[in-house]
Image: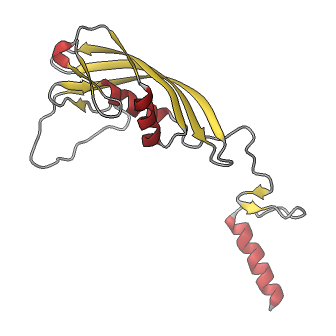
Amino acid sequence: MTIEKGPEFSRAVAIADLTGGEIRIDAEADERAALARRFGLVALDSLDAMVHLIAKEGGGVQLRGTLRADVTQSCVVTLQPVHSFIEASFARHYAQTEKTGTPEEEDIALDGEDPPEPLVNDIIDLGEAVSEQLALEINPFPRSKEATFNGYVSGSPDTGDEAAPSSPFAALTEFRKSKRDSE
């Protein structure tokens, strides 16, 4: 099986070369640095995956895999580094798609299976599949254990002796009272 490297983290495999075995892919230092920039990470210290490709009867390919990554992000509160380990399983289905001149609307059931990924030139990019799954697994709001929101309740500064309004309507009631008192 021939696996070609490409830009960023690409591992292209021709479906004609499928043998049905497991394929291990590891991101090298320059590829991890490029992915860290792409996903806004402080660092991506490791990224590896095991993928298994299965040719389906009637066409198409099923990809099943697991990825592992050591990720460093910035805390959304303190901007301190937040380290995490990601381990995830994923699956994708690839199939030939018919190209039409105009995009057509498709009925996609929200609780049904995802539509297949298109096979372009009968090649699957394993690295991009792993990269996309990593992007889904990254914590969108990383927070360090030391991050606190002292002095704030419901987004309002805590004055210490008075409780902040519990809803916008409570704040409106307070505003109307103060308006009446000033008249």
Q: Tell me which corner region of the image, top left, top right, bottom left or bottom right, holds residue 123.
A: top left
Can you give x and y, in whole percent of width and height, for residue 80 in the image? 67, 43
72 on left or right of 159: left
136 on left or right of 176: left
Q: Residue furthest left?
A: 101
Q: How many marks?
A: 0
Above or below — where is 123 with respect to 168?
above
Q: Is residue 54 visible?
A: yes
Quarter of the figure that contains the C terminus:
bottom right
The residue shown at (60%, 30%) is: 84
Q: Is residue 113 visible?
A: no
The residue shown at (79%, 79%) is: 177
Looking at the picture, tell me which residue is in the foreground, 179 or 123: 123
Can you give x and y, in whole percent of width and height, for residue 68 in the image? 49, 22
The residue shown at (73%, 70%) is: 171
Can you give x and y, in whole percent of width and height, for residue 117 in the image? 26, 31
